[in-house]
Image (cartoon, rainbow, N blue to C red):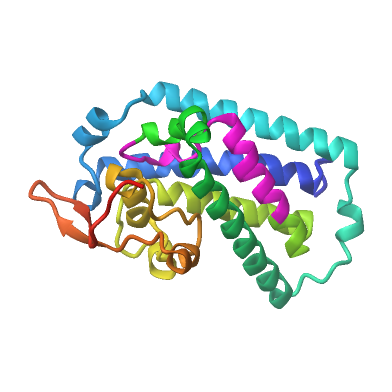
Amino acid sequence: MDFGVSDEMLGTFVPIVVYWVYSGIYVVLGLFAESYRLHSQQEEDEKNLVSKGAVVKGVLLQQLVQAVVATLLFALTGSDSQNTTSQSTSLLVLARQFVTAMLVMDAWQYFMHRYMHHNKFLYKHIHSLHHRLIVPYSFGALYNHPVEGLLNDTVGGALSFLLSGMSPRASIFFFSFATIKTVDDHCGLLLPGNLFHIFFKNNSAYHDVHHQLYGNKYNFSQPFFIMWDKILGTYMPYTLEERPGGGFETKPCKVYKDD
């Protein structure tokens, strides 16, 4: 059924809806899964440097800016959805496009993310906003400065889309998948049977290391693979230890120091 909405526009707005739906699911799970949390509820409330209300407003602002930019780009370049309907949509082609898009997004976000940590101006005025969440949680996954959202997510997403050759319709599923993965990385939970944790080493525990003060210059990779950290020496291995009050705690396995 055709509702008169282009695939490009759906690719812009569906992931926004997916973000809030899955964030809400993780919030509810966290209320009943204390034994699977990486940080206690008390730590989440005490350690973070920004209120949950401010986080919600910040994420909504970033999503609004990105949606406006994407809409303007579509208006200027024109929609080509009709021209891509004849493109092969076999599972093999889709799999190749998805893997290519994942690799492109990982490469872009690793180097951009790492640069924002090592450039003192960018970290102080832009990326440090995200690190006000010492203890990450699901709906804070996209709590970034709008400029970072455009450079990291919008540009990274556009490159993934263009270089993979996927159709606008396929991009709806890819960007929704990437959004769910990002939310999971920040959810602060280690739920049993979580497929993301089974297939990806880049998970909520891996990213939790990065948000702690000792891991600020390690584990930059996001959102899928950890190869860039391993190749370029920014990988910090860790162990998971049970907390006395329930849940788990990430502990680094190597000596670290500030650069």
Instruction: Say whether residue 101 is left or right of residue 89.
Output: left
Q: Is residue 67 above or below residue 234?
A: above
Instruction: Say whether residue 173 is left or right of residue 251.
Output: right
Q: Is residue 249 magenta?
A: no
Q: Residue at x 21, y 60 (%)?
A: 240
Rendered location of residue 62, percent (x, y): 59, 30
> Which quarter of the figure has residue 13?
top right
Rendered location of residue 76, percent (x, y): 89, 36
Q: Which residue sits furthest front? A: 259
Q: Residue at x 58, y 39 (%)?
A: 17
Instruction: Say whether residue 207 is left or right of residue 118.
Output: left
> Which quarter of the figure has residue 230?
bottom left
Q: Which residue sits furthest left? A: 244
Q: Residue at x 60, y 44 (%)?
A: 152
> Which quarter of the figure has residue 131?
top left
Residue extent of the magenta highlight: 134-159
Task: Between residue 231 and residue 198, name the one nearer to us.
Answer: 231
Q: Is residue 111 above or below residue 137?
A: below
Q: Is residue 138 magenta?
A: yes
Rendered location of residue 133, percent (x, y): 36, 34
Q: Which residue sits furthest bottom? A: 92
Instruction: Say whether residue 88 is left or right of residue 21.
Output: right
Prevailing secondary structure class for the magenta stretch in the rendered image: helix
Q: Residue at x 42, y 51 (%)?
A: 185
